[in-house]
Each structure stands twice: as C-alpha cells, then as structure tokens.
Image (tube, helix red, strand yellow):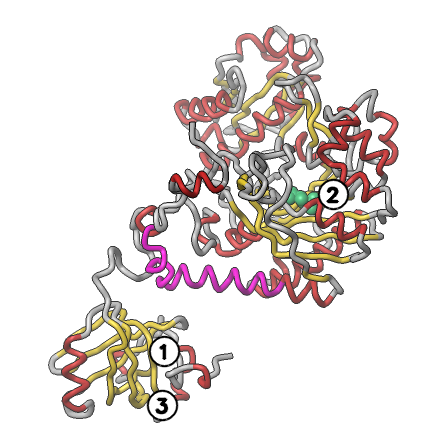
C-alpha cells in the first residue's frame, strides 16, 4: 500500500475519508479545477488515486497561500498542507471517494506550472483519438485511462504470481532474432556488423520457448512483446504483448487446465465475479464451432445458430439451392427470431450486402408474416411444400426471418458467421457478461488458394493427431492437430498447441507446407538439431494480454489499454515514429533507399 516514506506527501486522496478528519496532511498533485466562491477558493487536487477538494479561506489559510491559490491554473503541479475537516451537509459528494471531507489549506507550494492542455483532463471526453495520442501523457492523466493501466498492471501481476506459484520460470528470449518467413511479415533490423544481413523482431518467442524445453526448463513463461508487420485492424497493433507459456511432459488437457487455473486467478484479480468464470470451460471442436456458428471464435453470448437445411432443399425448384446440394455443397440458414417483425426490407438488404462483402453471391431470405403469409424473393421458386418443411426444420413461428447461405461448406459457414454477427447488431441483441470457451482440434493445415499448396493453420511446430500422422502426405486437409484457442466474447484471446518433439515428424510437417529437406534445414536447422537431442514432449499457449485487458476494461480497442499505442496505420503521433534516418545512419547499416 501507499507508503509516505518515499514522497513529499503524507497522504494520497485514497486515504482521505471521514476517518481522517482532524489529521494534518500534506498532499501533492495536479490542479484539476479551481473555483472562486464568495471569498473562498476551492481547488480539486488530482493525484493518481483520485480527487480531493481543498479549501482556501483568507482567514484560516493565511495571506500567502490564499494569494497563491488565486494565481494557480488547471494542471499546475502543487503541494499543500492543511487539516482534514468534514464537508458541510450541502456540499457532500457521494460520487467521490473523498466526497465527505475537504482539506482546509494553510500552506501551498507551486511545484510547476502548466500550459493550457489541448483537451479537458477528465473522463468521457470526445476528443479525436489522434489528438489524445499526440498528447498521450495528458490523456493518461485522465482517470479512465489511468484506471485501464492499473487494471493492466493488476492482470499482469496476477499472471506472474499465478505462474510463479506453479513453478514456472520467467525467462527472457531475444528481441533480435532470425527471420522466419512463416505467418506474418517480420519487422527487420539491419545489421551494422554484418553488411547485408538483418535480424527480425520476434513474431512470438515460439521456437525459443521450445528450445527452453529441450534445455530442461520444463515450465517457462514470459510477458513477451511480439511484433508482426500485418495490415492493422481495430484490435491489432504492430507490437503487442502476450503471456507466453510452455510446459514439458504434459497432455493437451494439462495445459488447458493450467490455463484455466491461472485465468481464474487473473479474473479474480480483475474483479470478475467467480460465477462469471466457471471452470472447466466449455469446449467446441473447430468443426462444431464452424458448423454451428460459422466462426472459430464464436461469440456465445447470443444464439442465432446456423441450421443445415441441405436435405430439405435438395432437388427443389430453386436451382441455386438444388445445384449447390447436387455438387456437394451445403445450404444453411439462420432463424432470426422475430427478425421478420423487427427488420425492414432495407435492413435485410444491408445484411445481404455484408454477406456479399464476406464472399457470398447474394443472401436469400424468407419473412414469415404475422398471419402465416410468406414474403421472400425466392418463395415462388421454393414452393409451398419446401417452405413448410423449412419452417419445421428451422423451428419457425410467425414473425421470424430466415436468411440463407449456400455454397461449399467452409465458405458458407464463414459467410453465415459474418452474417450472424451482423444480425445480432441489427437486432440490437445485448451482448454483456463473459462467455469464455475453448475451441479445440483445429485442422493442421489450411489450403492456400493462391499457391494451391498447404500452409500451417496455427504454426508449423504444431503436433498432428497421432491417428492422423499417416495422412500427412496423402490427405493433409484431413489431418487434425492438438490445438486449442481460448475464446472470450467472440475474440481469440489465446491459442496454443502441443508441439512436434520428433525431428523426423517435424521434417514431414515442414515438407507438407513446401519446405523440402534442404529448405527445412536452412530455415529451421537449429530447431531440427535440437529436436534430435532428446526433446521432451511439450506444448504451450500464449494469451493475448492486450485483448484480455481490453475485454476486462470494457474497452472497444486494445489502444485503450496500451500506454503508448500506435494508430491503426502503425504511426505514433507523439514521437512521429516511424521516421527517416540520416544518410549517416543509413550508411552505417549499409542501406541505400530506392
Ligand atoms: N506462439 C503461438 C502464437 O504466438 C502460441 C503458441 O502456440 O504458444 O500464436
């Protein structure tokens, strides 16, 4: 707790309540507000813990303090000494922790002056984000930003203590590493001492943590900064932090149980009620998640499940549906309960546009009207009998809306997954609380339409199901992997896998994704070597700290929970990074700009 030995103050506003009445205190902080009131001056003094009302009375405060109080302006830094007294009844402020008291000031010292800030230092401002980021240190002074950073610190601390208690060693892995053209693009750093060569910043400590397992560490963690040069989105940053974990001699269930135990402690530290995070968490296989929700990170705070109606429409007179089923595809729908009642034609069309944006050619729909009448552009093709069977298959009652997707299975699931979220928005379905789950058993590989080859789904070090190993060369698309994503409220907050710990198997997996023996040795020789020196069975997980804290803080962007974030285009308006290098700096690292 607060210890006055390390500061020029005796108290912070966290310690000032009715119990403190009568005490002589010295406070220090920023002037949040100053009001002149009929001969009295009030200063709301802000420190990290909150606000305290301080009163200057020409009689009690003495001439010097009062005169100085007249001069101070918002955001000046001051220290003051005075006595805590109860506020008069009509001045009580129940919204403020210190709202029952005030400090009658006898001495005031100005520690520093301040220019007028470019925006109000208070919660709930509507200032543009780039302005807030340009003066981020002022933004951080705002209580809501500071609280987000406090939450982040509490969460980080809870991870550390939960893992340390369980015998995990915190180990740092290098920031300057070897570029591995897997996954995202690397951020690269030119080498001065080795002309023409480059380091890469780590996309994750993946290989190093595996090497620590070969080194016999058995339980490792790190609050690790990771760098990925991807196109940015609302919940992405060029650098982000993950709680990186690796264990030896474990099963998939062991790692998931460990993650659940650690997360239980973290949630408690973040103030989440125990009933909101009950373990063991639900699990869905990847296939089930895709089939039922059209997403590998389903938001289970609402329904709108996908319903397969391929059998109902097989051979029907609506050619689009019939052809899809005849050629091995699927026709699926979502029953939007009361959606027909709630959504106008134009809102349904807006969702249809979103479906098209996600790759659909269009979005068929049927509204089941109040008196059993049916409105739909495809009703006349489907015919009464098929519509009646659809009604039954999808559990329709009057007022409902069915929207459809049709095509190859995976693509159709994905489109309807996007449509499902759009419908939840359109219907204003409330999404509150926490809905954590595991998605497990991902396919080992995904087909790359550009190259016609295969790429790793999680990463190439993931261990295929033992039972699927013999399909690696013959049917890679059917190989499942020991893999698990931690999903919270529709966001992937973590993911991990068991690893390949056998060098030959690792070579076979790398071969599937296009690395022949020579390329594998060149790129991953150090790993393959290590696996040949008695690598134990091992696996791990990485939990996205930024996303987790964002969700816990109720924020909508990870930028809100990062002290100094970049904009969505990867720019820092405060320092102007990235910036140019001088000719001298470029020459030092043997670079010439084209
Ligand atoms: N290294 C992986 C990642 O960053 C996580 C893991 O498999 O532990 O996504």
Nearer to the camera, 334 or 507 = 507
Secondary structure character of the magenta stretch overall: helix
Give the mark nearer the N terminus: 1 vs 3.
3
Nearer to the camera, 49 or 26 = 26
Give the crowd class for mark 3: few <14, some 14-19, many >=20 residues within 10 Å: some
Give me the C-alpha separation between circle 1 and circle 3: 11 Å
Nearer to the camera, 114 or 440 = 114
Camera-nearest label, 1 or 2: 2
Label 1: which secondary element: loop
Residue 370: x %, y % from top left: 48, 26
Residue farthest to the left?
Answer: 38
Up the image or down, 486 lies above or below 30; here it is above
Mark 2 lies within 8 Å of ligand 1 (Cβ measured) = yes
Residue at mark 1: 98
Give the mark nearer the N terminus: 3 vs 2.
3
Residue at mark 2: 497
Residue 162: x %, y % from top left: 68, 64
Give the quadrant of residue 346.
Answer: top left
Give the crowd class for mark 1: few <14, some 14-19, many >=20 residues within 10 Å: many
Residue at mark 3: 21
Label 3: which secondary element: loop
Q: Is residue 414 covered in magenta? A: no
For the C terminus, which image quadrant?
top left
Give the crowd class for mark 2: few <14, some 14-19, many >=20 residues within 10 Å: many
């Amino acid at each position: 707790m607060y210890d006055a030995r390390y500061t020029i103050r005796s108290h912070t506003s966290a310690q000032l309540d009715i119990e403190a009445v009568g005490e002589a205190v010295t406070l220090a902080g920023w002037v949040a507000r100053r009001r002149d009131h009929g001969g009295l001056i009030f200063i709301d003094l802000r420190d990290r813990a909150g606000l305290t009302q301080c009163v200057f009375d020409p009689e009690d405060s003495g001439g010097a303090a009062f005169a100085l109080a007249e001069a101070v302006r918002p955001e000046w830094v001051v220290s003051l000494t005075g006595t805590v007294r109860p506020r008069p009844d009509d001045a009580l402020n129940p919204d403020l922790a210190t709202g029952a008291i005030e400090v009658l000031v006898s001495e005031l010292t100005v520690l520093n002056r301040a220019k007028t800030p470019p925006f109000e230092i208070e919660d709930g401002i509507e200032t543009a984000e780039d302005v807030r980021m340009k003066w981020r240190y002022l933004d951080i002074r705002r209580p809501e930003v500071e609280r987000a950073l406090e939450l982040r610190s509490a969460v980080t601390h809870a991870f550390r203590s939960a893992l340390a208690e369980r015998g995990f060693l915190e180990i740092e892995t290098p920031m300057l590493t070897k570029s591995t053209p897997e996954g995202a693009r690397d951020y690269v750093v030119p080498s001065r001492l080795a002309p023409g060569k480059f380091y890469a910043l780590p996309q994750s400590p993946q290989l190093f943590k595996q090497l620590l397992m070969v080194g016999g560490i058995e339980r490792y963690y790190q609050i690790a900064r990771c760098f990925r040069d991807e196109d940015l989105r609302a919940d992405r940053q060029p650098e982000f932090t993950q709680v990186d974990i690796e264990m030896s001699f474990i099963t998939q269930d062991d790692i998931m149980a460990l993650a659940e135990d650690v997360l239980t402690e973290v949630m408690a530290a973040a103030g989440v009620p125990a009933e909101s995070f009950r373990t063991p968490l639900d699990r869905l296989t990847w296939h089930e998640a895709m089939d039922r929700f059209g997403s590998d990170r389903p938001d289970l705070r609402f329904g709108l499940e996908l319903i397969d109606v391929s059998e109902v429409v097989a051979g029907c007179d609506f050619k689009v549906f019939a052809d899809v089923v005849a050629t091995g595809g699927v026709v699926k729908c979502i029953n939007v309960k009361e959606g027909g009642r709630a959504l106008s034609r134009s809102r349904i069309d807006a969702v249809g546009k979103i479906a098209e944006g996600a790759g659909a050619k269009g979005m068929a729909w049927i509204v089941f009207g109040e008196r059993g009448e049916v409105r739909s552009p495809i009703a006349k093709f489907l015919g009464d009998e098929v519509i009646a069977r659809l009604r039954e298959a999808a559990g329709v009652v009057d007022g409902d809306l069915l929207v459809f997707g049709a095509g190859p299975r995976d693509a159709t699931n994905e489109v309807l997954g996007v449509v499902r979220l759009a419908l939840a928005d359109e219907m204003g379905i409330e999404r509150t609380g926490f809905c954590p789950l595991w998605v497990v058993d991902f396919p080992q590989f995904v087909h790359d339409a550009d190259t016609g080859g295969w790429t790793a789904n999680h990463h190439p070090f993931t261990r295929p199901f033992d039972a699927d190993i013999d399909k690696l060369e013959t049917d890679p698309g059917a190989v499942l992997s020991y893999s698990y994503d931690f999903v919270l409220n529709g966001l992937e907050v973590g993911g991990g896998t068991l690893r390949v710990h056998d060098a030959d198997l690792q070579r076979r997996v790398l071969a599937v994704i296009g690395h022949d023996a020579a390329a594998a040795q060149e790129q991953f020789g150090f790993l393959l070597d290590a696996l040949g020196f008695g690598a134990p069975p091992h696996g791990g997980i990485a939990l996205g700290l930024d996303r987790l804290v964002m969700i816990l803080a109720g924020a909508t962007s990870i930028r809100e929970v990062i002290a100094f974030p970049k904009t969505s285009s990867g720019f820092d308006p405060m320092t102007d990074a990235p910036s140019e290098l001088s000719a001298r700096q470029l020459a030092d690292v043997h670079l010439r700009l084209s």
